């Protein structure tokens, strides 16, 4: 469990994180979403005590991170792709970190095998590809078998194999009951991977909710209906208080009635339906809707897909 | 690699129960692991050894042939000659001291290190202990090695022959080894303050070599009174046998040099816990 309360971080005159309060509950993958520069990485550094907040506080399992003597048993973090020295082997890198928390040499070997670096472990990490670097970072995060994991943009720059590997990892970690916070600016990636979302923009909280709850509340959600007697059906639906929009392709977009309602109404009225489907807004559409009040957020998100 | 599980705590990772002392030992062990597992450490130590010992051997072979007996007798400080390699080995040890901390900032390793050990002063303290121990060992071994090799190459009865039992000789050779370690610690302190390898190396050698140059532009009375407190001049008094006019007493000079190193380290420790990583 991670809890942030009124977290604020200023660098000079720039406000990177602005009065941010959120929780990350255990047993779920929580997506931390926002455009590049929204303050995701800064927030992660604040959680780990690497940067000190200007005001506010954040705790991990009820205590500030810096209060833990051997924090690798509480929290594992992947902050940047290459947080290691190129001259050191992967094995030595992990061993040095393990030693500082009293973790055995055997665990280091196990993790190298787990992340698929068993054979490359003795080579200088400076020659690693981005994907191998991410794997090494993940091995480091798992050294103490922590209950909480923070992963900052873990799929950034990875090839499709690497992306699939990270996705499988996130699923397996959450299934084991761990608290997982994973940041990304890629909406489609988050839609696949996360159970819950914390959305920020310009350092401020925009929304935090379960994925299903968040998407269900989208105004773009509607039922798509196709019928040879579309005009007649539209009239009946409107008479019952539903809102009907006629699409160019001859289908109807209905809000204010469920697919069940519409199917039943058509049967009772003797009208034939050739299509009846619930249309849910994508995360990206929902995100646009949540941020539509601010032109800043919109222009920022428009750039994000190209950057990823 | 589609499905896998993370090995559980049981059997392989047990949370250590030890308190602050046990943890401090863990952090020292981690810093020793970092120190020994990069090649630059061994290159720098090897370079220091080669500079000290090879220079001494070459001088021990060449000097008796090129210097007349009278020139040799006039050379007041044969120990200083045998430590001629110090000019180069100090660069190797100074750079190593800087790199021990700045390489972590240069690579992003520092954030992994501080996430593992949030007690920053403990981490920097462990780093200091590990480096000081290694630099002290390397400094003493290579300086005594240089002295002994220089003496070994001198012909029997040569005027430059001394023994470690002669007044001031053992102190000067020991002082040279201590100087190397203290210089490395000054580098480590500057590295912790500046967090950039290039910046800290420039600052370290600037601090050593530039003030004496500026001093030559000042009135002679200033040179005599203030000059001895400059880092290089203060340090020099401990690794030469015969005290020069206007210089500090050997251990006083070394104390002054240590004060420079201590000031840099103190600033490093203070800034380390105050700044964002």
Image (cartoon, rainbow, N blue to C red):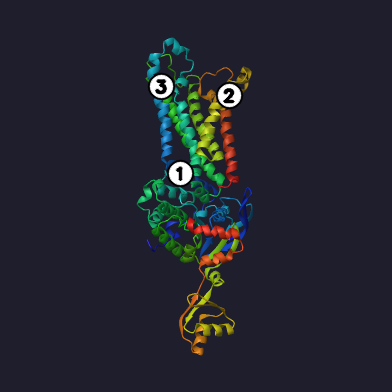
Residue B182 seen from this side: no
Q: Please state which of the two labelled residues, at mark 1 or mark 2, is closer to the viewer.
A: 2
Task: Examine the image and state in which quarter residue B36 appears.
Answer: top left
- Viewer-closest of A7 and A237: A237
Q: Secondary structure at mark 1?
A: helix
Query: Which of the marked residues, 1 or 2, is nearer the chain's N terminus?
Result: 1
What is the crowding at mark 1: few (fewer than 14 residues within 10 Å), some, or many (at least 20)? many
Measured as percent of width and height from the top left, residue B69 is found at: 42, 11
Mark toward the viewer: 3 or 1: 1
Where A193 falls versus A119 (above or below)? below
Secondary structure at numbered mark 3: helix
Q: Which mark is residue A28?
A: none
Image quadrant holding the N terminus of chain A, namely: bottom right
Q: Are marks 2 and 3 in contact (CB under 8 Å)?
A: no
| Relative to B244, residue B270 above or below | below
Residue B97 placement, left or right of A126: right
User: Could you tell me how far apart the alpha carbons at marks 2 and 3 are, in whole angstroms?
Assistant: 34 Å
Per the model, the C-alpha gap separating discs 1 and 2 is 39 Å
Q: Between residue B191 and residue A165, name the one nearer to us.
A: A165
Chain hosting mark 2: B
- Could you say which disc has been placed on residue B150 in the image? 3
Instruction: Find residue B214 and name its label.
Output: 2
For marks 3 and 1, give the CA distance.
Answer: 35 Å
Q: Earlier in the sequence, mark 3 or mark 1?
A: 1
Of all residues shown, which one is farthest toward the left? A119
Of the pair A148 and A261, the residue shown nearer to us: A261
Write down the residue under mark 1. Answer: B34
Chain letter of mark 1 equals B
């Amino acid at each position: 469990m991670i809890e942030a309360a009124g977290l604020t971080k200023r660098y000079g005159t720039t406000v990177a994180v602005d009065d941010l309060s959120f929780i990350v509950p255990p047993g779920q993958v929580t997506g931390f979403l926002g455009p590049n520069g929204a303050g995701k990485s800064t927030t992660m550094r604040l959680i780990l005590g690497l940067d000190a907040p200007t005001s506010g506080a954040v705790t991990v399992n009820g205590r500030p991170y810096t209060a833990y003597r051997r924090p690798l048993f509480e929290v594992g973090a992947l902050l940047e792709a290459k947080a290691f020295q190129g001259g050191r082997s992967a094995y030595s890198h992990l061993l040095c970190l393990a030693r500082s928390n009293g973790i055995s040499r055997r665990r280091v070997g196990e993790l190298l095998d787990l992340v698929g670096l068993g054979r490359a472990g003795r080579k200088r990490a400076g020659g690693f590809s981005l994907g191998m670097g991410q794997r090494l970072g993940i091995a480091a995060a798992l050294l103490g078998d922590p209950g909480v994991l923070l992963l900052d943009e873990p799929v950034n720059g990875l090839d499709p194999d690497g992306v699939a590997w990270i996705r499988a990892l996130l699923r397996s970690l959450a299934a084991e009951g761990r608290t997982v916070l994973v940041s990304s600016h890629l909406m489609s990636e988050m839609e696949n991977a996360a159970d819950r979302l914390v959305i920020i923009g310009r350092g401020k909280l925009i929304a935090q909710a379960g994925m299903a709850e968040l998407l269900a509340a989208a105004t773009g959600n509607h039922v798509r209906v196709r019928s040879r007697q579309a005009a007649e059906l539209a009239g009946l639906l409107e008479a019952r208080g539903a809102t009907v929009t006629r699409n160019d392709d001859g289908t109807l977009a209905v809000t204010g009635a469920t697919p069940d309602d519409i199917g039943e109404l058509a049967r009772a009225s003797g009208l034939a339906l050739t299509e009846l489907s619930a249309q849910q807004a994508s995360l990206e559409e929902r995100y646009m809707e949540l941020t539509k009040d601010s032109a800043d957020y919109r222009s920022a998100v428009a750039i994000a897909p190209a950057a990823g | 690699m589609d499905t896998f599980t993370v090995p559980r705590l049981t059997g392989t990772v047990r949370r250590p129960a030890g308190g602050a002392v046990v943890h401090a030992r863990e952090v020292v062990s981690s810093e020793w692991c970092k120190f020994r597992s990069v090649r630059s450490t061994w290159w720098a130590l090897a370079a220091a050894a080669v500079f000290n010992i090879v220079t001494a051997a070459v001088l021990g072979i060449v000097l008796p042939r090129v210097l007349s007996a009278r020139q040799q007798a006039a050379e007041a400080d044969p120990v200083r000659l045998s430590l001629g390699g110090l000019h180069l080995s100090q660069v190797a040890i100074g750079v190593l001291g800087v790199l021990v901390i700045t390489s972590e900032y240069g690579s992003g390793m520092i954030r992994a290190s501080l996430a593992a050990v949030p007690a920053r002063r403990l981490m920097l303290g462990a780093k200091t202990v590990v480096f000081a121990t290694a630099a002290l060992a390397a400094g003493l071994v290579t300086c005594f090695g240089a002295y002994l090799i220089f003496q070994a190459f001198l012909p029997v009865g040569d005027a430059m022959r001394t023994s470690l039992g002669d007044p001031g000789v053992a102190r000067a050779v020991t002082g040279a080894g201590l100087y190397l370690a203290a210089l490395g610690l000054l580098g480590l302190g500057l590295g912790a303050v500046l967090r950039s390898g290039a910046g800290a190396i420039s600052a370290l050698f600037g601090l050593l070599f530039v003030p004496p140059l500026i001093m030559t532009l000042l009135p002679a009375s200033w040179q005599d009174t203030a000059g001895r407190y400059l880092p290089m001049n203060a340090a020099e008094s401990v690794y030469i046998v015969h005290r020069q006019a206007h210089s500090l007493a050997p251990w006083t000079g070394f104390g002054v040099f240590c004060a420079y190193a201590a000031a840099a380290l103190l600033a490093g420790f203070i800034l380390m816990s105050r700044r964002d990583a």
